[in-house]
Amino acid sequence: MIPPAQSTTEMIPMLDLRAQHESIRPEIRAAVDLVLDTQRFVLGPQGDQLEAEVAQACGSRWGIAVASGTEALEIGLHACGVGFGDEVIVPAFTFIATGSAVSALGARPVFADINPATFNLDPAEVEARITARTRAIVVVHLFGQPAEMDPILAIADKHGIPVIEDNAQSIGASYRGRKTGSMGRLGCLSFYPSKNLGAYGDGGMIITDDEKLAARLRALRNHGQASQYVSSERGWNSRLDELQAAILRVKLRHLDRWTAARQDHARRYDSLLGNLPGITLPSVSAGCEHVYYLYTIRVLVRPAVSASKNKESATRSDLIQQRLAQRGIASMVYYPVPLHLQPVYATLGGKPGDLRISERASLEVLSLPLYPELTTAQVDRVAESLREALHE
């Protein structure tokens, strides 16, 4: 079969940050100019106000802005007592930062499998992996979908283990009336530019209801200084700058509207793709609000297939991705290698077949373009292109 010619139609990207910036350019310029006029660049009023505003939006009392989502996890884990030789349970299907934050503290990530419908941590897997060395459980709300928090919190409470929520991809999502990030000991946010609330650079935040913990986190992000030039413990240099804080305050005012647009686009995808054989659409758990950081489908392979046994099936989502690109549609695989099979963790002994649900997800997932500024015509074109790619 001769492959179709490369499309001459304008490419639909995974994300269009230029379009978003154009819609708020005057507000951003005014916010940046205000910071430039004050010449306050670190730990100033913009950061203070952003912390209060984000904490309120996430249903928490306190926010502590830091330099990145990864450092939010690392500092948060440290503040919860995680150190050298400890174990931390994390999902195997997530971005590497969830595991590397554990490793940075000299602790060992213990990888657990996921719920196949939500891509999030399976509570039964958590229970099975708790040992005398377990010091924390990291729950990732992946792709904008809340994890099953009630059973995980119950397991953690039974064993006296803190739960840390990796909420990098799900700001604004809710689980049974509670905002993601607000249910564990602390929650960690990322303001990486691609996120639903993204900075014009890097940034992150820790949110918590514990006032004493919040005070310690503020010291830890600033070289462990509880007062000026007096450090009570080793800390980090992890401070969100005022320019990013000011930009994020502007964007936060638009977040609810942008989230609603993402949800509208997801519903339209659902209606257009619901009858296509060979794929599974994103599911939304009962009582949950999905904020669609990513609209991720499964391009199905046979249940018996594993990455180690069938290389042809392992590339099926790649094949569909290539066919979409030929039609001018960007798409991405998040994430092609589960954490237990990452080269950096080879010494932990993970091998194919250990966590089959995560491994199968890595073969099947494909994320389609989804961002607030996407038009209805573009959604329709993506859906039609996917239909063609599946039947080619």
Image: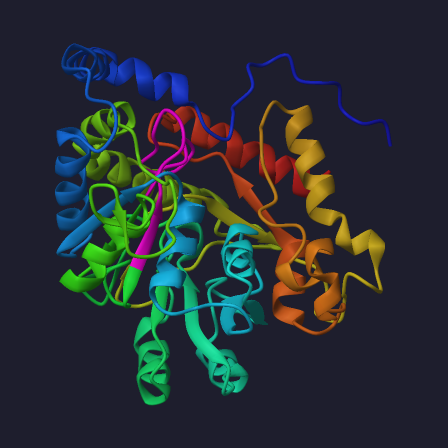
Stretch of the chain drawn in magenta: 187-204
Specify the quadrant that holds the N terminus.
Answer: top right
Q: Is residue 332 above or below residue 19?
A: below
Farthest-out residue, front: 230
Q: Please tell me whether residue 195 belongs to the stretch shown in magenta.
A: yes
Between 309 and 41, the residue placed more toward the observer is 41
Q: Please tell me whether residue 282 belongs to the stretch shown in magenta.
A: no
Q: Is residue 272 above or below residue 81?
A: above
Residue at (13, 30) in percent of width and height: 45
Q: Is residue 168 above or below residue 119?
A: above
Residue at (58, 29) in percent of width and height: 330
Q: Quadrant of residue 199?
A: top left
Residue at (52, 74) in percent of width and height: 87
Instruction: Give how far across and how far down residue 104 sits, in percent.
Output: 53, 56
Provide the major secondary structure of the magenta segment: loop
Between 348 and 234, the residue placed more toward the observer is 234
Left or right of 21 on screen, residue 357: right
